[in-house]
Image (cartoon, rainbow, N blue to C red):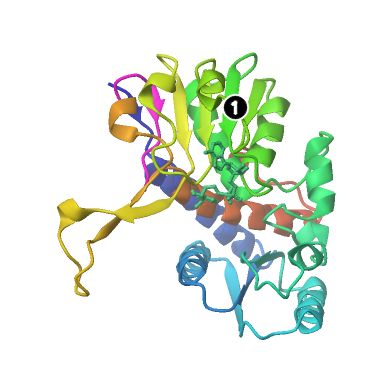
């Protein structure tokens, strides 16, 4: 049966190292890294994500600046606010939580963030840098997946990696990262005719489609390493009824986890796999931003 990759434990170790590093910055009189998080509107999932990002930031000793706008905020006001954060010397990293309301041009907002404060790695300049092998911020979720893969498999060179999903947030940067790590990369998306045929070839599977149970156990090559990025809330009648009489729910990934255990060599659970790594990598990118802006090398203990 497959090894379960404990993302919580791995993230915990990384966060402890980040905390030590941040406290040594303070002791050496170098100042404190700061992260600004901007939330627009009241999407419940976004509120949960922002809350856990802020909590992790504070636990690491990083200064957090939280800004909440009504969903009626104008694009001009939001852009002006980002500009203020860009020039605020206490703010080293800026994160605008997605999604944004429909009347706001998401790309305009992301591309307004100073590239050296773009800790999500979504700015055009960082995307272009990653694609051309230049130093850049790497989006937190793919970076977390890469760390889990490196720890599990060591050198990734020459392995076949199939990525299911190719969004700008997860699948696409994951493909770039694995290419950079000398994998042979296959990418499936919603118009791929036979996703199973691509997954069957893979030593590494990264599932990031947002479709519960999409990846069947018989799609997996025996011994594959499976990273399940999907976070899907589904009904869980086995847990009984909630107060409102509806069945309780649970979170599942994109992989048929129970069946995959018999085929894969290692697999991340949902929850407790990629999610915690995403948050730890946000802190890592913030420390990176702080070091770059202070003209210092990143501490070796935090090298990816
Ligand atoms: P998205 O909706 O932007 O992109 C989904 C991608 O999957 C698209 O490229 C689409 O073409 C592809 N796809 C959809 N259905 C498919 C199918 N049947 N077969 C093959 N490909 C298919 O989503 P996203 O933002 O990339 O997120 C993907 C999943 O990862 C979601 O469940 C999301 O909640 C989760 N997520 C988790 C984390 C984390 O920290 N663990 C972070 C970001 C996203």
Mark yes or no: residue 32 visible.
no
Assign the C terminus to one quadrant of the image: top right
Relative vertical location of residue 222 with respect to residue 5 in this rendering, above or below: above
- Of residues 273 and 29, which is closer to you in this image? 273
- Of residues 4 and 215, which is closer to you in this image? 215
Percent across and percent down for residue 124 are 82, 52
Mark yes or no: residue 188 visible.
yes
- Of residues 157 and 298, which is closer to you in this image? 157
**What's the magenta region?**
261-271
Which residue is at 66% across, 86% downward? 72
Q: Label 1 belongs to which residue?
A: 193
Which residue is at 46% across, 72% downward? 44
Q: Is residue 92 on the magenta stretch?
A: no
Which residue is at 72% across, 65% downward? 92
Relative vertical location of residue 22 with respect to residue 277 in this rendering, above or below: below
Q: Is residue 265 on the magenta stretch?
A: yes
């Amino acid at each position: 049966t497959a090894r379960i990759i404990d993302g919580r434990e791995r993230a915990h170790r990384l966060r402890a190292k980040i905390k030590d590093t941040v406290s040594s910055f303070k002791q050496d009189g170098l100042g404190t890294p700061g992260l600004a998080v901007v939330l627009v509107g009241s999407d419940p999932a976004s509120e949960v994500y922002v809350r856990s990002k802020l909590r992790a930031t504070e636990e690491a000793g990083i200064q957090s600046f939280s800004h909440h706008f009504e969903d009626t905020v104008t694009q001009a006001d939001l852009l002006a606010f980002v500009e203020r954060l860009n020039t605020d010397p206490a703010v080293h990293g800026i994160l605008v939580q997605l999604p944004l309301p429909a009347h706001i041009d998401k790309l305009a907002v992301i591309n307004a963030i100073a590239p050296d404060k773009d800790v999500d790695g979504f700015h055009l300049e960082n995307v272009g840098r990653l694609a051309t092998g230049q130093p850049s911020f790497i989006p937190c979720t793919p970076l977390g997946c890469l760390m889990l893969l490196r720890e599990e498999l060591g050198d990734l060179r020459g392995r076949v990696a199939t990525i299911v999903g190719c969004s700008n947030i997860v699948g696409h940067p994951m493909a770039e990262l694995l290419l950079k790590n000398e994998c042979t990369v296959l990418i499936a998306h919603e118009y791929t005719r036979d996703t199973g045929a691509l997954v069957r070839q893979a030593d590494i599977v990264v599932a990031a489609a947002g479709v519960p149970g999409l990846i069947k156990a018989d799609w997996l090559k025996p011994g594959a390493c499976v990273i399940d990025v999907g976070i899907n809330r589904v009904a869980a009648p086995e847990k009984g009824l909630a107060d409102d009489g509806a069945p309780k729910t649970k979170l599942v990934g994109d992989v048929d986890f129970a069946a995959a255990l018999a085929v894969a060599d290692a697999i991340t659970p949902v929850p407790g796999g990629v999610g915690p790594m995403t948050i730890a990598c946000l802190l890592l990118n913030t420390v990176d931003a702080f070091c770059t802006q202070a003209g210092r090398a990143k501490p070796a203990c935090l090298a990816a």
